[in-house]
Amino acid sequence: MQCKNCKFSSSSEEVLLKHYRLHHPSISSWPCIHTGCVCVFRTAGALKSHLSTSHQNRHRVSQELSTISCELCEFQEICSEKRFFIHLGNHLKRKETINCPFKGCGFKTNNRPTFSSHRSRIHRKHTLKDFRTAIQTVFERIDNEVPSISQISSEVEIGDDDRIQFDENVNSQTLEQKIASLFLCMQTVFHVSKDATQKIIEELKSILLFSKSQALHSVESILTKHNVNVESNIVKEIADSVCLTNPLLTAISAKGILSTDYRRSLYFKQHFPLIEPTEYLYEHTQKASFVYVPVIQVLETLLSLPCFLDKVEFTNEHLAGQYNSFQDGKYYRENVFVAEEEVVLSLAFYIDEFEVCNPLGTSRKIHKITAVYWMILNLPAKWRSTLTSIQLAVLGRSVDVKKFGYDKLLEPLIKDLKALEQNGVFVETLGHYVKPTVFCVCADNLGAHSLAGYQENFNVDKFCRFCLISRDQIATVKASDFPLRTVEEHNSFVEQLKQSDTLQSVNGVKSECSLSKHLRNFHPVTGFPPDILHDFFEGVIPVELSLCLRDLISKGYITLEGLNHSIKTFPYKYSDKVNKPKAILKSGLVKGSIGGNGHENWCLLRLLPLMIWDCVPEHEPSWEILMDLKEIVEIVLSHSLSEETLCYLSCKLADHRLLLTSTFPDFKLKPKHHFIDHYPQLTKCFGPLVNVWTMRYESKHSFFKNVARDIHNVKNLLLTLSVKHQQMIAYHLNAQSLLKSELYVEKVDVVKISLLDAKLKCAIQRKFPHVYTVSLSKNVCLYGTQYAKDMIISAGQSNGQPEFFKIEHMLLCPDKVSIVSKRLSAWYIEHLRSYELVESNYADMVVLDLDDLNDYHPLIPYRLRDRVLVTLRTYLHH
């Protein structure tokens, strides 16, 4: 058996587990130590449980397995007799009547004790092979040879020739690092305060010192047991030595290296990849300050890690008419810097304000903070979804930013960015320099206008940063009728401002952008993309939901109480459980916006057709407005778009606007209604806009809010928050857990092909003709996305419509994961903008790879009145 994180190997489970805990203590996943097992676990405890149940040291394992079908539900699995009777027990708990599964027995009952009594009296000697053929398709006995304990060598193999003793020699530095890593995890990941950490350490120290008497008693007992006579003072010396040399006690004792917060902080600096923030004064005559984390040092650290560098994609093959990443957008491909340099690293920055205290309390706005984060866009989206992939650049108080301006706040950042554009970062693994550049700055509309130098009031005449439309033209002129602003045009507006002492703004431009002043490859026209979160989920969607639901209620199709009851009782599953919407308040309908956060509004819009699908008649205008909006959002959130899809999006936006204004002639369109009309054009410029939205960045605020809540002290708050963040990043860098693990799977059945039923066996053999044993699982997590039995996936198309499949098994191979699925019949229901799925007993099974899917997100089926419906998350590009 070999460690799956390094080259260490051993024939002993115990030695390999000890190696894991010593040398990979903080890894984000724990793979099974057995070579042929593909299971991966989130915790060491789960791995240990798996080893005890699935890899027990027995001379021979004899097991009867069969493919069994349940007569009461869709259960059909390869399982043992015990496992099937557990399943039947679940039916009996619900008082459902079951038939005895054994041949020639007509016994029926819905009482669990009665069935147990019947089985023990009548079928004590019967086994799986005596099941009725109607529920059993294949039967086989498996005998597995497993090495016994006596066969396991007591030596550890590191190489072909080198051998060491059973126990690894663990030095004090390794144990110190483990203890320090634990304290660092407590303080930064679990947000245990300094005082609480110190209290825990003091109590641990007391417990260890009090254990001296126990150690003395143990030594005396051992010596007595072996008839060894030793003087009492020597026994005491041995016991004292055992206690005092305990590495934990040594580290936390009065003069220990981890005994105080100051010493722990010093240890973290010296032994962890900690990049410390620097505090800057806005002006030397003022006390106001901000903190900056050196971007150059962070980049050098990240690119020096092979596990990180391997995932970075520097180049992308552009297909004409396809938009799959930011590198397919017009602004990236026409960037002069990209054309001149061989290897370019594109950075996305994010700027926003957030409250660390209760925004409704007395400290409102007093401790409001302006934050600047950044990430590497060359990381594929599946790796960028973790919050630890988002790095901190700047923290400053919002009142100071307004007083001193962005030029002062961003001065050290801009200095580093200029150096990066000129000199780059040398990557030793690649053997050459990499030139980073700022591709874009993500922000809400107010933040984008503020930093870019546009007017921050959206009631002004030239309110749009994308075009030159006037405020009074929103309702009458389509955005596509106005060309996008150009770099040359914007520069001329800035020149007019510089040459005039009286002009406050020119066509919406009020000042020069702080970044474009100093960075030759960044410009506000091409560097500030729109944001789906604020334009749709916290803008257009809550407004139109309020407008249309109020109309549907007034017409008597639904009631507010009935709608809220449907929202509360809907059978949410998987991720929908986390994002389920809250009840809609009457005040929200009156004000013209239901409020709520982006996740909740997205979930409500997607699932609303399934909640009240039978209440609203077809072709009802208010309902059609919401369904068109749902379809538009699905397209906008897609990670892959074509020219044809963008043309369709333009048409849908135009139809939606026309229907909205004709149904509600008194409704005044918001500026965000105009912004979303630009989305087809802006997708061609920036690539899929979901790659640059602010949803994940805003989640980063929660870390700082948790730290601020736990420290109970706002003195020097900015430095405290930034230090805690950098310590957290250092912990994950040291633990190799900065990015998500590729795979989590905790339950796997290793089965011979001959055991499978005919359809399943045929499907697997078509894909893998030379495989005789397969690893099957019901539930896996790939790159943070869960795939489970009975979820729905889409792959390919038939007659212009996407095809759907139900997940039956996840098939795990050493180098990839495939999906065993059953083909479904599907009908598109226009009224619900959803699909109805029907499963046939004659449908074939198919083994699909992830690359075959139309979208990597699985869909969640909902059974409503004997109909199975799915509603899409994103537009299915097929």
Image (cartoon, rainbow, N blue to C red):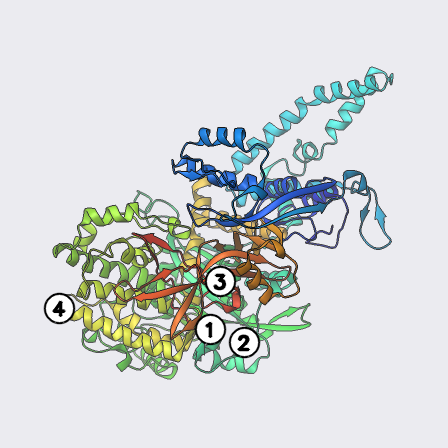
Which disc is residue 665 wearing?
4
Residues under numbered marks 3 and 1 in contact, where contact means CB atoms less than 8 Å apart = no
> Which of the two labelled residues, at mark 1 and mark 2, occupies the earlier sequence position?
2
Residue position for label 1: 324
Amino acid type for the residue under numbered disc 2: Asn
Q: Position of residue 259 (x, y in %)?
A: 63, 35
Residue position for label 3: 374
Distance between mark 2 and mark 3 Cα atoms? 21 Å
> Which of the two labelled residues, at mark 2 and mark 3, occupies the earlier sequence position?
2
Amino acid type for the residue under numbered disc 4: Pro
Residues under numbered marks 2 and 3 in contact, where contact means CB atoms less than 8 Å apart = no
> Which of the two labelled residues, at mark 3 and mark 1, occupies the earlier sequence position?
1
The one of 315 and 427 positioned closer to us in this rendering? 315
Distance between mark 4 and mark 2 Cα atoms? 47 Å
**Count of number-bearing discs:** 4
Residue 710 appears in view: yes
Amino acid type for the residue under numbered disc 3: Trp
Q: Is residue 650 above or below residue 574?
A: below
Distance between mark 1 and mark 2 Cα atoms? 10 Å
Q: Position of residue 374 (x, y in %)?
A: 49, 62
> Which of the two labelled residues, at mark 4 and mark 2, occupies the earlier sequence position?
2
The one of 372 and 868 positioned closer to us in this rendering? 868
Distance between mark 4 and mark 3 Cα atoms? 43 Å
In the picture provided, is 826 more to the left or to the right than 3? left
